[in-house]
Amino acid sequence: MEFRLLGTVAVETHTGPLPLGPAKRRSLLAALLLSANTPVSISRLMDSLWDDTPPLQARSVIQGHVSRLRALLVGADAEAYGVELVTLGDAYVLRVPETLVDAQRFEELLMLAREQRSPGDTVLMLKEALSHWQGPALSGAFAGPPLRAAAHSLEESRLATVELLARTYGTLGEHHRAAALLAAETSAHPLRESLAAELVLALYRAGRQSEALDRFHRTRRLLADELGIDPGPRLADAYALILRGDPGPPPATPAARTKAPRTPSRPAAPSAGAAGAPAVPPAAADAPPGGGTAQAPPAAQRPWPATPAMHPADPLPVDLLPRAPRGFQGRTAELAALTRAAAGESPVCLVTGPAGVGKTALALQWAHRNDALFPDGRLFADLRGFSEAGEPLLVDVLREFLLALGVPPRRIPESASAAAALFRSLTDRRRLLVVLDNARDSAAVRALLPGGADCVTLVTSRHRLEGLIASDAARPVPLDTLEADDGTALLAGVLGEERVLAEPVAARRLAELCGGLPLALRVTAARLAGRPRWTLAALADELADERGRLACLDVDDTGVAAALRLTVQHLPPDTAHHFARLGHHPGGHVDPYAAAALAGTDPVVAEAALERLSAAHLVAETAPGRWVLHDLVRLYARSLDPASAHEALVGVLDHCIATALAAADTAEPGGEPCFVLPDGFRRPAAVRDFTGRDEAMNWLAGERENLALAAQAARGAGLEDRAWRIILLQWPQVVWRVRDNWAPLLELALESARAGKDAYAESRVLTLLGWVLTEEGRTAEAAALLERSPQLAREAGDPLGEATALINLAVVQAELGELPTASENCLRAVELARREEDRHTEMLALQHLARMRLTARRPEEALACARTALDLGPEHEEAARRSLLLAICGEARLALGEEEDGVRLLDRAAREAEDAGYDEGAVRALEVLVRTTAEPSYRLRHERSALRLATAP
């Protein structure tokens, strides 16, 4: 999949371009791609889609375009590429890997081209960058002011790249190529003086002096006629060069084309100590005291001579960087992101991520790969923000930096503020890299920022350091865990490829059990390296046991638990309490309500704790209001407070019950009353409030996996009364998506009900499970289960449960051809529902009775039953039920020979089902219409509904 902005706005897939449709939809996509992975507000999108005042329905138009674009991306399997269009409050964000966007690849190639030492390599990179352009940027979109500005900026970048390519051709002596390249561009941009100047020089150096002079005079006249101005300095200088007969710089020799100069692009200023004293090399200065954070390298490793033979005005390169990490794997995207972040003036790059994810390794790897960018040296300090030894004094870090820069010890100020000012002064004219590792907060970093515009600061931290982003425009580069392939490669780098290739499946399993955490992988590799007779499979089996996994991932004082302990010990007590309780959460993700239930607090306090944990990279926010824990972090959290496991589990299970009750009541307000709460039920401090059916159903769908895991945990802990309730309360979703593999979960509920010897629960579960099996075509199994359900309901004194059981049993009997018995059971269900004054159950029984009458070829009775049922439910409720009943009425009219009325009713049934998102009901009604009439729109709607049903999540 590829997203194109450099030409016609498009999305290319392996089957061809997506049909994006109108220009405004392309504008929407362009606006989202230009701010990829960043929320774009509705107001910003309005500016992009309309030139003047947006219409009143602008928000609805944008929502419609977003919905269609999201559907197109889902249909193209965008998720497999890491692409997702999500809604964040009043904004939208298109999450997309930068490698899939042509504009991002263009910028990355341009950046890499500028870093090449060989002009030949630069040419290759620049040509590859320009190959991404297929026409004017953002073509095919309706360009509002922001998009026009973006298109102009992209075009300016392209033209600058063309000029750079022409100059590089000139460096290689290939002036004819430069002239050919520039001629086409100057025709399209005749008033761009920089292009004209480059073309004049290229023609002249290619031996085409008369053409060069002609080009100059044509451009001069055009500037005068069109703009009333004379040529600017660049064009005038090119003309003067021709008049002087200056041949210009010679082409690069073969050696010069492959080797970069070792001197900086501009001379650095002389280093000065306090009171203006010239700096001297560390070799000539007093020896620095021990115990500092950053240390000068030994004499044998220094890049300067042992004797200070250099003139004081010559800047001395320094290198305090630790060695490059061994066995470094992957991180291609993050390294490229660091390169982009390091561009610009005085950039501060911020590598953030959880303990053990490899932040320091990434920073050092990038620093060593880009040493040529920093001819004046590289400084490094471990700020020990998460160390038991505590953080170093700021003045001590500055002292080591100043010593490395050549300031004698007696000239270093004693106060941190004065030392910081001297550090900024000394770095003002240098090109330095400053690596600040393990920063705990923004304040620890600010005083260590160098003063030079050409200096780059690289910070690593377990915290997000949002203050540094706000005050110094730090550019964050978040670091996540390694993919399984990279994790396996890391193991191979330590153990040797032969050992990993001998057990590839076990190696991949080890990478997965380590959760892609580089620290855990290195500890695992260290254990195996010291035990050559151990197999990878044996260690994988040992790690598979969660109870001892953290212990297996510790070697001496290094390991996952040790790293996490240093992070947790800096948390406030209430946040640490929430973190420990999160370890007992049985699900995959947690929200503030669940976190509050686990910790015995309220959602507001829990959300604040989750935000602090997220800032410390102990949890990750994957969507607004939804956080997840890495598996190893979960195990560590669980180990902090094992005694609270049962209390925390009961709290979160009862939260699930309370929230699912609220969701079911909101989704199906006409449904029958739910069961009583379990003994010892702990009501949460607050329960989520659902504003409507859609929100409730979305919650049930989004929490399906969590609810299943909660039910399994309840069953495992012997809390049977919680397990079956959590499962059964999902009945609105079961009804809505009946063919979505609910049987295994309902079988777990049945086991719990029987283990608790609860006739009420067993009857209810049997009734729902039997209906699911019926819909799956497992009729015989359903009949065997449902035979017992009405009797159990009678024993439990549950007349409404008995009525529902009779209905579902009747459906199975009708499937088996036992229509008389099925009809009797439906009639009995109608009587029970009327006695209990429950319209919902009566409507359900009448619906199935009407269908049976229709099957028995008694359309008049079917029509009467359906009409009675329709009269029971208000039109704004029971959308799915109404659709099914209207379809029965339509089929009955057809059977009575009243085709016009039958088609009208079936069409109404299909439309109500489509409006409600009830694709199954729409398919049923449209199937009859397709058989009845040749109207092509019915076939098209049927195909669309069937496709939605088949691809529904």
Image: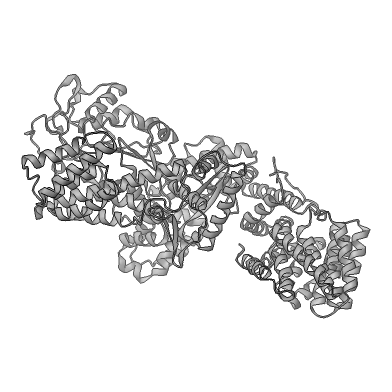
Residue 463, by quadrant, is: top left
Above or below 812: residue 326: above
Q: Position of residue 174 (x, y in %)?
A: 14, 55
Above or below 536: residue 220: above
Above or below 925: residue 464: above
Q: Residue at x 79, y 77 (%)?
A: 815
Q: Nearer the viewer, residue 308 or 866?
A: 866
**Quarter holding the C terminus?**
bottom right
* Count of all numbered marks drawn on residues in the image: 0
Q: Residue at x 18, y 24 (%)?
A: 273
Q: Position of residue 593 (x, y in %)?
A: 64, 44
Q: Nearer the viewer, residue 568 or 187?
A: 187
Q: Is residue 724 visible?
A: no
Q: Nearer the viewer, residue 916 or 233?
A: 233
Q: Is residue 411 visible?
A: yes
Residue 228 lies left or right of residue 634; in this view the side is left
Q: Nearer the viewer, residue 795 or 930?
A: 930
- Farthest residue to the front: give it: 225
